[in-house]
Amino acid sequence: MEHLVEEAKRGNTSPRDLAANLEHSVTVFDNREARILRALLDDDGRAIYNCQTDYYRGALDSLVKQGYVQRSGKGFSLTPFGKAKTKQYLLPILNRISE
């Protein structure tokens, strides 16, 4: 996020681009979305039948709509954007664990 602020200070980004970048960098997942992302992280495509129940359906639909998850054959997979956001979400958690 600091690099976004520096770019804005230098005038290298428009207010619209800055807002879009901030929106993408401050993504917060609810618990159901986070579980789905973790389930798909190390898989190129997975049926995730448990995540297609009523309990998870809204979260799965939200992730598809946001472009983080895509249908893949009979299942789902992370998009490149979804992989990047999942990594961004998990790294701080993993770093706290290793401290």
Image: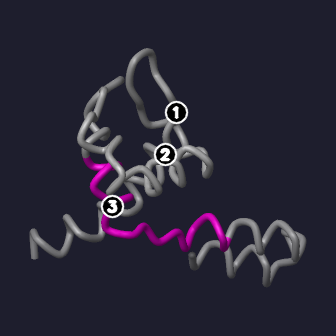
Percent coordinates x, y for residue 80 in the rendering:
52, 36
Mark 2 or mark 1: whose residue is earlier in sequence? 1
Which residue: 68% across, 81% down? 5
Which SS class for mark 3? helix
Amino acid type shown at disc 1: Gln
Side of 17 where 41 appears, left or right: left
Q: Main secondary structure of the magenta part?
A: helix
Instruction: Locate the N terminus by quadrant.
Output: bottom right
Residue annotated with mark 1: 70
Residue displayed at 47% across by 72% down = 28
Q: Specify the segment rendered in magenta.
A: 22-38
Q: Quadrant of residue 13?
A: bottom right
Percent position of residue 30, x then y? 39, 69
Q: According to the image, label 2 marks what residue? A: 82
> Residue tagged by mark 3?
32
Residue 6 at x, y percent in the picture: 69, 79
In the image, is 72 to the left or to the right of 90? Answer: right
Say if 1 sits above or below 62 in the image: below
Which of disc 2 and disc 3 is earlier in sequence? 3
Q: Quadrant of residue 76?
A: top left
- Tell which tag, 3 or 2, sits nearer the viewer: 3
Disc on res. 98: none
